[in-house]
Amino acid sequence: MSWFVQGPGSHTRAVNLQRIIHSLLLVLSTAVLWMGTTPAHAVRGGGPVADGTWGFVAKVNVGESRGCTGALVSPQWVITATSCFAAEGQSVTSGAPKTATTVTVGRTDLSGAGGRVLPVDWIHPHRDRDVVMARLALRAVGITPVAVSATAPATGDAMQVAGYGRTAQEWAPNRLHASPVVAGAVAAASFGWTGADGGDVSACQGDTGAPVFRTGGSAPQLVGLSIGAGQGGCLGAAADGPRGADAVRVDDLASWIRTVAIEPTTSFTRYDASLSGIGGYDLDDNRDQVVAFDYEHSGKLDHLVLYRPGSQIVFIVKRNADGTYAPVFSSTTGIGGYDLKDARDRVIAFDYTGSGKQDHLLLYRPGAETAWILEHGAGNTFRAVFHSSAGIGGYDLKSTADQIIAYDHEHAGKLDHLLLYRPGTGMARVLKRTGAATFTPVFATADGGIGGYDLKDARDRVIVFDYTGSGKQDHLVLYRPGAETAWILEHGAGNTFRAVFHSSAGIGGYDLKSTADQIIAYDYEQSGRLDHLLLYRPGSKTAWILKHGAGSAFTAVFHSSTGIGGYDLEMAKDRVIAFDHRSKGGQSHLFLYRPGDQITYVAGRALPPVRVVPVTVTPVVGPDSIVERYGYPVNFPHAFAGTSGQADWGTDEAEARNFELISGNGGIIWVSCTASPENGVGVLKVFPGLLNGQTEIGEPHLGVTAVCFKVLGSGGWVKLRIPNVYEVQGDSRSPGAGHDVDATVVNVASGTERTKRVERDESEQFGRTDITCDESHPDFPDNCQETLLELRVVG
């Protein structure tokens, strides 16, 4: 969005008294929502939105080709403009988007860490309006959706508009901007809006889909979506162009939105079942065990490791697009050198590298002191990155009772620590990887238990759990089946733990009176967070799901004495794990199996019947489109001119400096090499040689010439063409500050592209041999044959 104060001599349309009153009330009611400082040229009462305000407003990125705004209208659905998903003349069809699309929602400041960033897995356009519903791969639980208004807009109605589009000075602002507006002329399917009380407001590129909503009453109500504007005063547009915008109405689409935006029910249903094992693994032995695993390093636990300790048999199976399962790995001689010959062998998934992915397997043999960690490499190969016959990290693994689980000890969102414990003895140890194959205890006790829980009963079990709904499995659930005991521990400062929940009467109404009781963490809300507990009693058909509420309270969101989703749980050997059945990034399905009987079953929350008919539309993309297409601005004044005296940093000026700026997302911009460092972060410096031995590229700098860039966003990228590049220098000017970037170049002779990582405090050499592209070389400048194509922030 962009706001401008009308200068002397500007024409202000007359308004009636009712509109003035509406506007004044709107300004007064929303004044507390704006940031404390007002940017230059901001409208009265308008500007950047304060953190935590209007979290339903969503940033929509359709690959790296289009950017828009939208609104969360239910936990898994965002409404935006269909035109965001198509170039002119292209059609949009119900189904998976043609270009990978992500939505950021609940994050007023895009550079922050709040809210969610989620892929879109399905879209459904409206047949007659520039409106589309986009389904998120996971539900954005915890972010309040906006209600759809049941009242049509009327001329003069006071509203708000909010978007992530350009401003007068910013190409891709990190912070949500908003302004009070009033409705103009209203038609059957659309209406116009202008700045409230004559405010000078424009919608800009990136504001397609920006919600227009009422703020009166207890909660915002969505009236329409901005879809077109004259963009007057926006960066890259005419300063004297038309203000305001056109919006498509959604107030009369509430029924259509409800039909599309189906939500899961509280009941469970079957999604897959077999009486002959799964993916070729027969499950014909009582020893069979199953764990979920991130085989493809995707961050998704969407593969199943099935193994038979003592037999050397192990399979890894994947769900295919057609719903069938097939092995991607199978062996009768163990895996990665680990033989699986002992009935005591156990396998867990583990984040060995701290990548946030459980893409390594830890195999151990309690009572034999044996532990291995395997890495999945090319194809279906595995190799040991750790192996020991003397325990791990000082924990000896000498008891057959020993157990190991992966744990997020540092609240980092990574299961990169190991908790090892020996039920019945009070022994526990938390290990951290501190070297290539070295583990060091960060907590250890020989017999004192942990956090007040004594671990002195052989029945004791421990699992990790997302107690706070943070997306981190950084709490421990310790329980004693048959004794009604359950504790939940939080890791505090240093190596301390404290109980945030403890009970000797079960938990959430589940009594834990049977020694058969089992507990697992489960993503009940399909949010990607294991913040519910599934408790079940194999052999008795009992299953409960508990949700953590206020304080330390737990309540049942599901309970059954007849199994779950059609699986009866009537056998004592029944087992349940949570896994990512649909590869969405959340363990929201349950894999239930009965080893020895070949029975497998996949259950999950049931969905209501789908009543939508697929639609194909061709949206009209007119000259007033406000979709951000990420073309580098032609005219781009900014505050990073340093001492250069240069006023414009757009494409025309770059061409005059003999290089080309093509596109980007505003996270990396061309600036002066004399721009001052900020908080220890300077500029990225690109050093090109002379063209044909005589033509300079960029600006004079340090006795040569350079083209410099400022990183403004953690995901920043820019596509360009800077010829004869021989060096790229990082932007760190203080230890730890700055950004690592990937620089992609092309050899102009061979056409070969390559990418090199430029560390923040280092320089990387380019040219034919990386070390000969300098002015002192006898073949200069012919030896400088690489053109810089892209800079991209990593990490």
Image: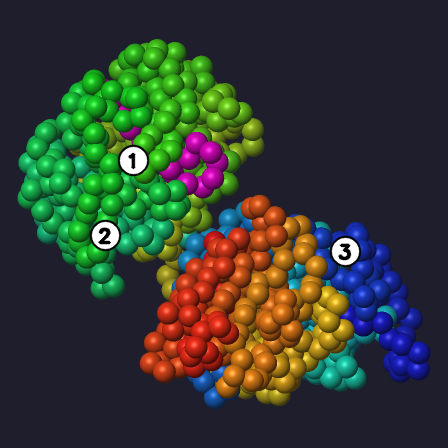
- Mark 3 vs mark 2, CA separation in Å: 51 Å
Element carrying mark 3 = loop
Residue 597, placed above or below residue 150 = above
Query: In the rendered image, which quarter is residue 231 located in?
Result: bottom right
Q: Residue at x 41, y 41 (%)?
A: 414
Do we see residue 127 in this rendering?
Answer: no
Q: Point out residue 367 in the picture as x, y percentages from the top left corner.
A: 17, 20
Q: Is residue 131 left or right of residue 458?
A: right
- Mark 3 vs mark 1, CA separation in Å: 51 Å
Q: Are marks 3 and 2 in contact (CB under 8 Å)?
A: no
Count of marks overlaid on the render: 3
Residue 238, placed above or below residue 125 = below
Element carrying mark 2 = loop
For disc 2, the marked residue is 377
Q: Residue furthest right?
A: 8
The amino acid on which the numbered mark 2 sits, given as a three-letter code, is Gly
- The local crowd at label 2, few if under 14, some if 14 to 19, many if 20 or more residues have their Cα within 10 Å, is few
Magenta span has 210?
A: no
The amino acid on which the numbered mark 1 sits, given as a three-letter code, is Ala
Q: For residue 34, which numbered disc appears in the image?
A: 3
For disc 1, the marked residue is 437
Q: Main secondary structure of the magenta part?
A: loop
Sequence-first tag of 3 and 1:
3
Sequence-first tag of 1 and 2:
2
The range drawn in magenta is 401-417
